[in-house]
Amino acid sequence: MPRAALEVADIFRQHGEAYRAEHPLPLAQMKVMRAIETCRTATLGGHIEQCSNSHCLFTRNAYNSCRNRHCPKCQGLARVQWHENRQAELLPVEYFHVVFTLPEQVTELAFYNQEVMYSILFRAASETLLTIGADPQHLGAHLGFFAILHTWGQNLHFHPHLHVVVPGGGLSPDSKRFILCRGRRFFLPVKVLSSLFRRIFLEALEDAFYQKRLQFHGPTAHLRDAGLFHDYLYAMGNRDWVVYAKPPFGGPEHVLKYLARYTHRVAISNQRLLALKDGEVSFQSKDTTNLINNNNPKR
């Protein structure tokens, strides 16, 4: 792939130092910026690449990559390897694509408590699938699956949700046979999944509050009060939580290919960048409020 006309690294090199001086950043974020700034430059040293064909004498000098998972230029090979590894694990059965989404009000709290909330999200989704899957009224089997966390939506707004790829069946309680779903187009009832997911998540969130593992800033600052937090949990418990569960269009290979594009990609990739002018960056994102889904530049 040819080098993009404008890269995130270019922006960091031109404005990173001034931005860090004006906006103190956590050490982890400063390390990421530094890695992106120095990626494939003389700062990291270099190596000689040579054609593997014994009849070809072509060689070239190449700078080393930073290999930081947040770097827009360092995830191509890792993405391919991830896709190949997951594809090798597929079983010869129907697969389902399940998505667990947090309500907007919970997303606000997640923004200031990402480590805690993401852990709860993974655990709640996992317990939900294992519990409902093991119920004899539904499947009566032990499920296996893998989950991918996405933290932004198509419009690049903060939108944490979990993509789960699940085979259409699981091992029997005695582990001696594989129990298939009752129909190719039906996995588990989404209303049941949604209700249990909501309960498990909110119970874990309440525990995190009383264990003082949560921070409250900005629009969530008022939730420091135990009474108001209890009211918040009650309100969230009376909302519908969205769990999407359908067979992946085109088979499991299709959903793997879709997820592989996001497992090793940052939100603002080099390909999204349009221009850097007068200290402002223009980039593309999908406007989900537009039914035509046009790509509109944002600053």
Image (cartoon, rainbow, N blue to C red):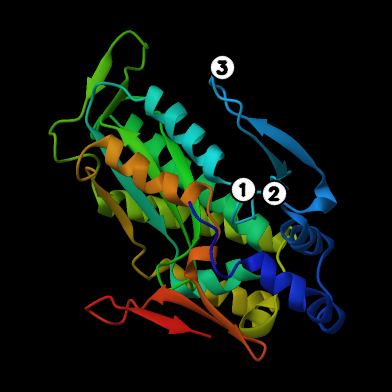
- Of the residues under marks 2 and 1, which one precedes in the sequence? 2
Categorize mark 2 by other alpha carbons within 10 Å: few (<14), some (14-19), many (20+): some
Is 4 or 127 nearer to us in this picture?
4
Q: CA distance from mark 3 to mark 2?
A: 33 Å
Is 121 or 24 nearer to us in this picture?
24
Q: Is residue 295 above or below residue 208?
A: below
Categorize mark 1 by other alpha carbons within 10 Å: few (<14), some (14-19), many (20+): some
Is 48 or 28 nearer to us in this picture?
48
- Of the residues under marks 1 and 3, which one precedes in the sequence? 3
Element type at mark 3: loop
Residue 57 location, x and y as percent?
Answer: 61, 26
Q: Nearer the viewer, mark 1 or mark 3?
A: 3
Q: Give the residue type at disc 3.
A: Ser
Element type at mark 2: loop
Is 230 or 66 nearer to us in this picture?
66
Q: Is residue 240 above or below residue 105?
A: above
Q: Give the residue type at disc 2.
A: Asn
Q: What residue lies at 84% left-to-right and 52% top-to-bottom? A: 43
Q: Give the residue type at disc 1.
A: Cys
Q: Is residue 244 above or below residue 22?
A: above
Residue sticking out furthest to the right: 21
Q: Which residue is mark 3?
A: 54
Tag 2–tag 1 contact (CB < 8 Å):
yes
